[in-house]
Image (tube, grey):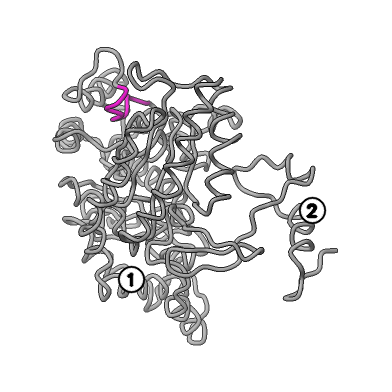
Amino acid sequence: MATTSSEVTSAELQEQARRHLWLHFSRMGPYEHGTEIPMITRGEGCYVWDDHGNRYLDALSALFCVNIGHGRADIAQAGADQAAELGFFTTWSYAHPRAVELATKIASLAPGDLNRVFFTSGGGESVETALKVARQYYKLTGHPNKTKIIAREVAYHGTTLGALTATGVTGLRQPFEPFTPGGCHVPNTNLYRLPPGYGEENLAEAIAERIEFEGPETVAAVILEPVQNAGGCFPPPEGYFQRVREICDEYNVLMISDEVICSWGRLGEWFGAQRFGYQPDIITTAKGITSAYAPMGAMIASDRVIEPFLDGNNSFIHGFTFGGHPMAAAVSLANIQAMEDEEVIENVREHEGEFRAMLESLRDIPIVGDVRGVGYFHAIELVKDRETRETFNSEESEHLLRGFLSGELYRRGLICRTDDRGDPVLQFAPPLIAGPEQFAEMEAVLRPVLEEASTMIKAM
């Protein structure tokens, strides 16, 4: 039987974690053999501390989440205050004031006629909800065969069995096959590595071609992130989303903007669709909706999408116990209010150029191949040869990312993401309150570590 105590030592926490805590997306084997588990114990602003008292610049907002910054007791207090009034009641056939207030606030910030908010507990649930809405929408409107989903290669849309239909990362899909059928994939907007025969101008056309190939009468939705996360922060080319909107209208297909990461200021607007000037039928969101001070997500649908669900005895046959939880809704309202009062999104707009310039300044390091992204959401792609854009094989990538960069960056006080779900990248998504001081700290760590990595690669 495990015991807990406020007086447990770091060694005891490590022992208990190894015995009882199953970490997400983690190789657990090394911890079984004594490797220390990183143990983060507190946070303030753009920084967190571990159980040894070491300070780290959190240049990933934990996981693209903590937009308002760490240590905001006032945001958390909103949840505690709500608990004293109403700790929980379901939104299955009932409402409560905080869910109503939050839905109304979200509708006021969302683009166009996205006025209907279905709450979830997180991003995967939001995507799952959007896909189920799309299927039932077309059954209710007389198109029962429209079930397929068009997504992009290497895109990550979640790990539930339904969301895996859209996720385009082979390694995340294969262990769980077979799963919900209907996922179809097209090239993404990695302009650094365009597929043979593709230019920027025909990436959107690939979606139309895939719809035609599958049969328009079988396709329910296209799901796209404003800036694709997996693979390393792929922004769209000019006019891409406007053309996708036209394609969706032409073929009677719903357009889902997956903004689990790209909403709530990450790209310098409340929603990523606003940054790129397009109007989706559905937005999926989570993470920054509460700045991760409570677990919450949402699907935001247009008036057109909900219309058939309002007819007669129809209903959306779907729900989650904790969707719209009163405490999470109160935290979200406090988070959004603080972002408005403190002009957090304006801070992103003011300083995103300096953030990008800092990353661009690293291009003189041979291993740096590409710098890309938008707002406070950027990536550096690492290459073996910058002239030819030659990438690393799997063994080299393993050695570079997990054998050196991940541990060395953390050891020097910088938390970012090393990822090779596509080509090897470093990803950065600092809290939206970050500014030039934090960018300078990032550069002070990144430059020497990447220079060492370049030297290491030459010797391989």
How many C-alpha atoms fall within 10 Å of the one at disc 2: few (<14), some, or many (≥20)? few
* Three-letter code, disc 2: Arg
Q: In the image, which disc is placed on residue 102?
A: 1
| Camera-nearest label, 1 or 2 | 2
As rendered, which of 266 and 441 lies closer to the eye?
A: 441
The residue that label 2 is drawn on is 19
Q: Badges 1 and 2: C-beta atoms under 8 Å apart?
A: no
- Mark 1–mark 2 Cα distance, whole angstroms, equals 40 Å
The quadrant in which residue 240 appears is top left
Can residue 289 be found in the magenta stretch?
no
Q: Is residue 419 visible?
A: yes
Q: Residue furthest top?
A: 197
Q: Which residues are magenta?
A: 185-193
Q: Residue furthest right?
A: 1
Q: Whole-percent x and y of residue 138?
A: 30, 40
- Report the side of 26 relative to 452 (left or right): right
As rendered, which of 342 and 275 lies closer to the eye?
A: 342
Looking at the figure, which quarter contains the N terminus? bottom right
Q: Whole-percent x and y of residue 251?
A: 20, 30
Residue shown at 51%/87% (left/top)?
84
Q: Is residue 221 visible?
A: no
Q: Whole-percent x and y of residue 172?
A: 54, 33
Residue shown at 35%/54% (left/top)?
439
SS label for mark 1: helix
Looking at the figure, which quarter contains the C terminus? top right
Can residue 186 be found in the magenta stretch?
yes
The correct choice, above or below, for 403 with respect to 192 in the image is below
